[in-house]
Image: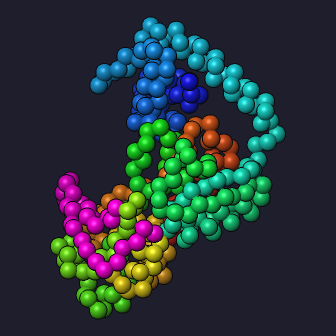
Amino acid sequence: MLRLDDLEVFVRTADAGSLSAAARLLDISPAMASAALKRLEQALQLRLLARTTRSLRLTEEGEHYLRHAREALRLLKEGHGTLTQGKEQPGGLLKISVTSDFGRNQLLEWLDQFQVQYPAVAYQLSVSDRLADMYRQPVDIAIRTGPQEDSGLVAMPLAHSRRVLVASSAYIARHGRLGSLDELRRHNCLRFAVNDVIHERWSFRLPGRADTVTIPVSGNRSADDADVVRRWAVAGQGIAYKSRLDVTADIRAGRLQVLLPEIEGEEVPLFLVCMHRSQVTSTVICLRDFLRAQCERFSASA
């Protein structure tokens, strides 16, 4: 079955003459764009584009099919415009899956603000650190952290963030301030588990080095709820390795301190994810833009 978003990737790639340029225009990753083209070629049993490491051009079949793809997209968008005319104001039910930290500590308040602006929008919220199966669960959009490896999904970036080492003043007073990464081995490290796998190898990049350093850590507590790990850190139970976005409010309020701030932690970008391009409605786009602005303001206040 042909997918509308795959057709759009093909047309944009042909127009831009570059897969990466088309991906930027569509706000998706190059890997997702490449997967879309591969699906379309497999569905048609045709080779539409001749690709090398340095160039990309339409094949003869691709030139012929491009005219039909443009017309199909034009007719579909024209039909969609007719149906949605006068209904551009955001509204309807959004089923949202979100991680525990971001969901409880930022998103709840921000959704309240969004709903004041757009009262026709309703929410059904699922708060969990287990990765939602968007193909089986009743979820319209998911807010996820870290690199998005499923190239079949539409991932729209919301914010850039890195992990930071944090601890409370009480913990530092009892156990001393961290002097180097190696000292993590003797500290009580509060670990996070995803899908029953405990994250107990923490990676960093030292100043002036391109490679990463990985430190095995241990401690007397772990949880499959990232917000619980954050609360333990605030309570002085140990050192946590958290996305800075998730602990910005605690840092600002003095509940947590950043340890070894000169060392870069792992990248944990924040994404709004949909299963299909057709789910990127005007309401979803409006929410995406609102959350991007909120994340930017929130991060700037740290």
- Chosen colour scheme: rainbow
Q: Position of residue 228 (x, y in %)?
A: 45, 75
**Residue closest to the eye, 228 or 242:** 228
| Residue 205 falls inside the magenta stretch | yes
Extent of the magenta region: 197-225
Query: Could one spot residue 12 in this view of the protein?
Result: no
- Please state, as top left, top right, bottom left or bottom right, where the N terminus lies in the image: top right
Q: Residue at coordinates 29% horizontally, 25% vertically from top-left?
A: 53
| Residue 209 falls inside the magenta stretch | yes
Left-right relation of 253 to 92: left
Whether 174 is drawn above or below 74: the answer is below
**Residue closest to the eye, 252 or 230:** 230
**Residue closest to the eye, 64 or 298:** 64
Query: Could one spot residue 23 in this view of the protein?
Result: yes
Whether 254 is drawn above or below 264: the answer is below
Q: Residue at coordinates 79% horizontally, 42% vertically from top-left?
A: 87
Q: Position of residue 70 (x, y in %)?
A: 60, 18
Q: Position of residue 39 (x, y in %)?
A: 46, 26
Whether 136 is drawn above or below 184: the answer is above
Quarter occupied by residue 199:
bottom left
Q: How many marks?
A: 0
Left-right relation of 22 to 283: left
Left-right relation of 86 to 135: right
Of all residues, the one furthest to the right in this rendering is 86
Q: Residue at coordinates 46% horizontally, 66% vertically from top-left?
A: 245
Whether 158 is drawn above or below 106: the answer is above
Q: Residue at coordinates 21% horizontally, 72% vertically from top-left?
A: 181
Q: Position of residue 230 (x, y in %)?
A: 43, 75
Left-right relation of 265 to 111: left
